[in-house]
Each structure stands twice: as C-alpha cells, then as structure tokens.
Amino acid sequence: MRGEKAVTVRRQKVRRNNIKLRLSFFLALTAVLLIVALFADKLTPYDPYLQNYDISFQPPSTEHWMGTDRYGRDLFSRVLVGGQASIFSTLALVAIISVFGTVVGVGCGYFGGKLDAVVMRISDVCLAFPGLVFALAVAALLNGGIVNAVIALAVISWPKYSRVARSQTLAQKNSSYVHAALLAGDTPIQVISRHVLPNILGPILVTAMLDIGTMMMELAGLSFLNLGAQPPTAEWGNMMSSGRSMLQIYPWIVLSPGLAIFITVVIFNLLGDTVRDYMDPKNSRSR
C-alpha cells in the first residue's frame, strides 16, 4: 500500500510540474504577443498606411515578408499594427463582460428576490438567440465601428459570466464562514468583497481565459462583415474582408491576417486550457 501511495504521489508531482511548465511557456508566449502588439508602431519596417501603387499585389519576398495589398501597403506592417486593434479590443471586451457579468451574478445570487428573477429572465432572452446573429443585429443598429462591435458582443456575452457567478455565489452564500461573518457584524457588501468574491474568482478567471479566443473570432467576424473596424484601419478581420475577392489570385492578402488570427487564438486557447488544469482542485491538492 505504501508503495502504491508513493507512486501516486510521484505521478501527482510529475503532473503538477508539467502543468506549471506549460503554464510558464504559454504565459511567456502571451507576453511576447502582447509586447509585439503594444510596440507594433515601432516594429513595423514600413508605414502600414503608406500607399504605393507601383508595388501593388507583390507576393511575399525578402523585402515584403507577407507581400503587399492592392494599394501597395506592406502586409507585414499592417498585420503587426492590426494586432493592436484585434488583441486589445478582445481583451477589453472580455474584461467588460467578465466584470459586469460577475457583478450582476453575485448580486442576483446573494440578494435573490425580484432582482434575481428579472435579471435571469433578461439573460435567458440573450441566451435564446444565436450569439453571433444577435451581435450582428446590434452592431448593424449601431452603424459599425470597432467600439460598437465591442458593445454589440458585450450585450450578448455577459449572461455566461452572470450564470457562473450566480451559481458559485449560491454555493458560498450558505457556508458556515459567511454566517460567521454576518454574526460578527459584517455588512452584505463586506461579506461579498471579503469572502464570496475571493472564493468564486477561480471559475470566472478560467471562463474568461477560455473566452478570449472565441471573442477574438467573433470580433474578426463582425469586421469581416464590415460591422466592425472600418477601412483604412488595420484590423485582422477587416483586412481579410478587403481581400476576400482576391483570394484565388492573390491569396497572401487574406492568408496573412488569417494566419495572425490563427496563431493568436491558438496561444490564448492553450493558455486557457492550461490555466483550467492548473486551477483544477485535483491538481491543487498536490501542490
């Protein structure tokens, strides 16, 4: 029995170390991605908005790594600068829906009553529609633009977080330490901030990390349909939209921003999966 237990402990340690190593690796990749996006203006070899019709539709070469578009603009420079709009808009969107959804969910779960009934019915309405179709309708009403695209996706995406926060709050609400805090004289706001929120942030953080890739794809989808970033703004979805009619003739115009979206979404999804594994209670017990 002792030998089997020792083997189990060793396996848990190996698994824990592997998860930590993967987490460090993907955090480093994410940091590099964010740094490149942040300083993209200084890293671009050419002006991403400078037009030169003499070099239009040039294929990838040593001079222009990703080729040029119909206006002779360097695609590599535009992809770098486009990361600012695509990545930071996505992070802002996830931050907005996670914070708003968590506040709403915690309030509904802790206080209950009519507030809970009304807000949950509103969330049911939002969840009843296909998400992207609802976002398309809202973005069209707002007349497009990257800010309006973020607002449109925020309107239909917050219920997911409110549901998670509400269920976690209901589980914590009747715990013994919450009752002890109330008997000690803590107000409901103090109980929420000191005891409830710290114990429910784990699942919300994991949900947010896994949602980054999805939100980036949906933002790019709105821009692709001309309901997000508008020309000449360098944004990956908008760049794919402007070159979609030339996909068969000049494929690099579409594939360059598409490759950037693919790499970014993969990195954030793998980071989210690793964070979920790291915060799994089965793994936390072996730390």
Image (tube, grey):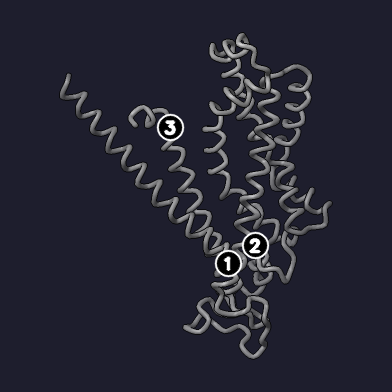
Q: Which residue is depicted at the point 71% across and 47% down?
A: 153
Most foreground residue, 43 or 130: 43
Q: Is residue 143 left or right of residue 239?
A: right
Q: Are marks 1 and 2 in contact (CB under 8 Å)?
A: yes
Q: Picture quarter containing residue 241?
A: bottom right
- Say which of marks 1 and 3 sits in front: 3
How would you rate the neighbour count of disc 2 (Cα within 10 Å): few for under 14, some for 14-19, many for 20 or more?
many
Q: CA distance from mark 1 to mark 3?
A: 35 Å
Quadrant of the image containing the C terminus: top left
Task: For mark 2, give the secondary structure.
Answer: helix
Q: Give the Cα separation between the discs numbered 1 and 2.
A: 7 Å
Assign a secondary structure to mark 1.
Answer: helix
Q: Quadrant of residue 279?
A: top left
Please rate how many residues cluster around mark 1, counting C-alpha atoms within 10 Å: few if below 14, some from 14 to 19, many from 20.
many
Residue at far bottom of view:
54
Disc 2/disc 3 C-alpha distance (Å): 34 Å
Q: How many marks?
A: 3
- The mark nearer the N terminus, 1 or 2, is 2
x, y percentage for residue 33?
50, 59
Q: Mark 3 and mark 1 in contact (Cβ < 8 Å)?
A: no
Number of the label disc, if any, that sits on residue 237: 2
The image's mark for residue 257 is 1
Label located before the other in sequence (1 or 3): 1
Residue 78 vertical position relative to residue 127 in the rendered view, above or below = below
> Which disc, if any, is residue 32?
none
